[in-house]
Amino acid sequence: MEPHTFLKRFPPLLFLGILPAIPAAAQQAAPSNFSFASGEALTWMLLIFMLAMLFAVLVLKQKVSNARNSYKKKNAGEQARQLEEHTRHLNSEQIGKLIELKKHCGRATAILLLLFTAALSVMPAGSLLAQNAGAPAKSSLLSETGILITIVLLVLPILAAIIILIAKVMNTLDQARNQRNLEEAGKLAAHLRALPEEMIDTELRKRKAALDYKLSHRELSGTQTAADEKGLLHLNGETGLPIVALKKKALPRPNIDPALSRLICWYLGFAAFWLLFGTTVGEYVGIKFVAPDADHVSWLSFGRLRPVHTNAVFWGWASLGMLGLGYYVVPRVSNTKLANIRYGWYALGLINAAVVLGTVCLMAGVNNGGGEYREYIWPVMVLFAAGIVFTLVSFLRTIARRATKEIYISNWYIVASIIFAIVITVVAYVPYWQNGLGETIVQGYYMHQGVGMWFMLFTLGIVYYFLPQQLNKPIYSYSLGILAFWTQILFYTLIGTHHFVFSSIPWWLQTVAIVGSAGMAIPVIAGTTNFLMTFKGAWYKVKDSYTLPFFLVGIVFYFTGSMQGTAEAFRNTNLIWHFTDFTVAHSHLTMYGIICFFLWAGIYAIVPRLTGKEAPQITIGAHFWLALIGLMFYTVPLMYGSTLKGLMWIEGKPFIESVVMMAPYWLWRAIGGSLMWLSHLFFAYNMYKMMTNTYVVDVRETAIQKLHDSTVPAQPIV
Amino acid sequence: MEFFDNHKKLFGAATVFFVGLTILVAIMPAVRNQENNQPLPDAVPLNAQAVRGKAVFVANGCVACHTQQVRNVDMDKTWGSRPSLAADYAGFTRTDAWRNTATLMGTERTGPDLTDVGNRQPSRDWNLVHLYNPRIVVGESIMPAYTWLFDIKKEPDTSDVVVNVPAKYLHGEEGKVIATQDALDLIVYLQSLKQAKLPDGTEAPAFLYKKEEKKKTGDGKAAPDGMALYTASCQSCHQANGEGLPGAFPALKASPVVTGDNLELYVDIILNGYDARPEYGVMPPVGANMEWTEYEVAAVINHERSSWGNNAKQVTPEEIRKIMDFVKQKTAR
């Protein structure tokens, strides 16, 4: 089979990014006829699912057989050997403690209790997992919406059950292992107690001396200091083969109210969930540009899912992410406790409820009338608004009781952005000025203030706190921050209607918007300068840190993305780019390149400090690079293609030709989107690693602890 | 500074500043536009069915890809005879207690603009087939297929509107495709989208950024491109290969009307439409809708007569002018 037809038949492969170098395949004039209702797709999904199951079963089997082996009755000799083994491997500190304990041994009367005796019978996990999602029904039936929905409804809980089952089994096995280790520790403790005195004196002491033996590190160099008079020595501290560059560890922060830290973790956890959900939808919507017949289900049609994607990432991911970080920053820079922690929980519940309800409404075909980001109907949006009102009250009270004289600039940005978000929501949803073109004027105002005054302003506040913190030096210029604050309000408020240049809204209003867009250069350049100058003299820290690269990317896109917005607003460029996918590329360059990267930077900076746990460096790296490369694959082809599209329109070419011309660029967008989506899987995994507690009982450490507990009598209460 | 260290003053000032600007650039212009514009006298308000159709249009998020605004720039000439005006939107008010006004101007043009689609594409048959699956009639289209707006019946009633869908797109299902009420409503809405005429004596605003005209004919007028006209106005039914769609739209390849000598019938069909044969859909008056002159008609005829293996005599605009006058007289009678 030649690759061309192969790809045509199995387009899902393209999105997996397995074969990224196939732009030629997309030159086909007609869109792909791939459909999820087709037999092929089902076969593929089933195959992937079976592979995943097989993998899970193999892993479980391995775990179970390990567990079973260790449960097998060991003969006495073997057991003794194992205890000997443990004894031999005690480290110096442990031996020290043991010797110490043995001294008290005579007085000790405690009896060792073996607390855990139950042995868990291991579930025959494999047989349970064999239940599958069920064989596919006849494919003609599968094009029926009702049947499809039913199947999905049936399969979802089964899948969830399987996943939960696997997790439970893993968990049980881990518990069993820990229990075993505890038992073994008990035995070891008994064994150690029974060790004869002479052995303590001779062997263990010897062993300890051996373990404690250290080289002086001067055996070869002698005691004279080396002189490198010719400057020949270049010492590299790194040894071994580092797969990822070694970065500095996050330091646990003392004195964070555990209640607050719990709240923040929940905010950020939900944010990560909505990111994953929203971008999964976005990814699917992007795929529909290449395979428009992927499904014929009303709830999943393009026009309904597109706003589901935008609203979920706006109000779910970005808003909750910002607020979560805000709940950390506001009390911290006020040097006081958060005023109303309960309000934070209310806000979290309300905002989540808004996104869930809004998503269901949009998919059911209930929307507000089609204005972008204003698709949620007012009863849904009122929940969101209530959520940020609670937050505002809590933040204002916190700032009112601040222990510092000045209000740190972060709080200017954060609190102002919440006030402005409430104002724009009211303006957007109050009906008195929404008839005829009034709706359009308000729409232009709302959609741009939403991004500029809510997301951008809030995120800047977060950066003004976390960037200096991560660089461990103060912000370069406080006054530049103040200049950027006021000029952002002045210019950004004006620019909304640049989304309707050449439309029938008043010409003067369009001109004001264009002038305002040009004025945006002032806050953007002020902000960028401020951030980059803060890096001055600390650039070397970038390579040692896994948060600073996120900040750096965010700053670069803050400058380029925002200035691109200015460039797009002019009438001449509007002529080419308006109505094309250039707008889509621009909004991803900014909402993703700026907002998401800054949020990730903040999250990776703060969560380890709250939980004391870090994500593996390699998966943080994977997240960073996939997101960045994916974003480039997403935006650059779209910008290039849509420029060509605009030129074709100016030339008066038939519309459908511009659709055909875009096909390869849309494919690249889907590939870039897939990489971005993949990076979010890594992000979700990292969040999991940073937030969950998994620990393994250390046999030796516990044994010593047990001995210690049983030997040292409890202090009598005086 | 004391001012910046007082949270009431600081946030109060920022709020007043922002709200003041908001009133200036959003609320006041919005209120003024709402108060000072009236629908054009010739504008036809949506009937009850079209209102229902608009609700279907809104519910399915069609505005994500289809704009409804002809901008005052030259390239938007394709989408309407004049730039859209504030008056065109003045009749729109709040939808209901739950939903805001839907002017549906849109910000993305992934699909064609729909301001004047009622004139450009008035055929119900074409619209229904296209809605069932756009790729039946436009192979390159990436528009979603709205199959859930249709039923499949073994034995359609006489009142049912049957849509001619090729077997390939039924995916093995047996029976006839029937348009649901939602689909019919939506089509009525689309058919009602027509630019209202300006009152006599009112001059439409100019289209800006005019393209430099390249090809000039003897009398200084640009010769229209027959192929482009065909692609824009004819191809969606008769297809790029001129073979039409069996059971829905007739072929122009080797068509006796196209290649024969009866120019009068040919020109009449292009200008005023055709509904002589029950097995095909009704052809709308494309030429009259698009206000074609003899130059456009001649260009289209010459393109159709020299494509897809057709090889018939070419015509001149002068010749067509005479026939058009004759046809017009005949229609008047």
Image (cartoon, rainbow, N blue to C red):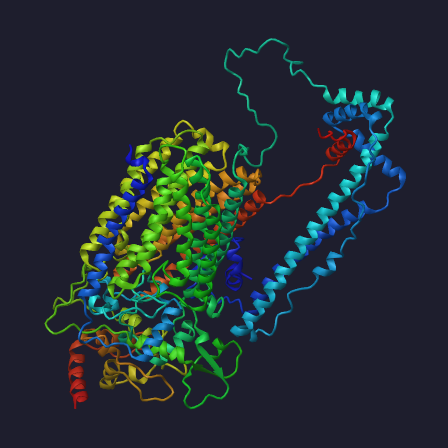
In the visual, does A441 lie left or right of A370? left
Identity of the residue furthest to the right in this view: A76
How far across and how far down the image is residue A597, in percent? 44, 44
Task: Report the residue that reaches farthest toward the front.
Answer: A718
Of residues A355 and B261, the one drawn nearer to the viewer in this rendering:
A355
Residue A69: % across, % down: 80, 46
Residue farthest to the top, as pictured: A224
Instruction: Return the x and y of residue B74 as percentages of the image width and height.
Output: 21, 62
The relative height of residue B273 versus residue A340 in the rendered view (above or below) is below
Residue B232 in the image: x percent, y percent? 29, 70
Is residue A145 in sight in this rendering?
yes
Q: Quadrant of residue A502?
A: bottom left
For the question of whether residue B240 can be seen, the reply is no
- Quadrant (top left/top right/bottom left/bottom right) for the C terminus of chain B: bottom left
Going by the image, does B221 lie left or right of B286? left
Q: Is residue A555 above or below residue B137?
A: above
* Quarter of the image that includes the N terminus of chain B: top left
Q: Could you tell me how many numbered marks the image carries?
A: 0
- Residue pictured at 82% horizontal, 30% vertical: A192
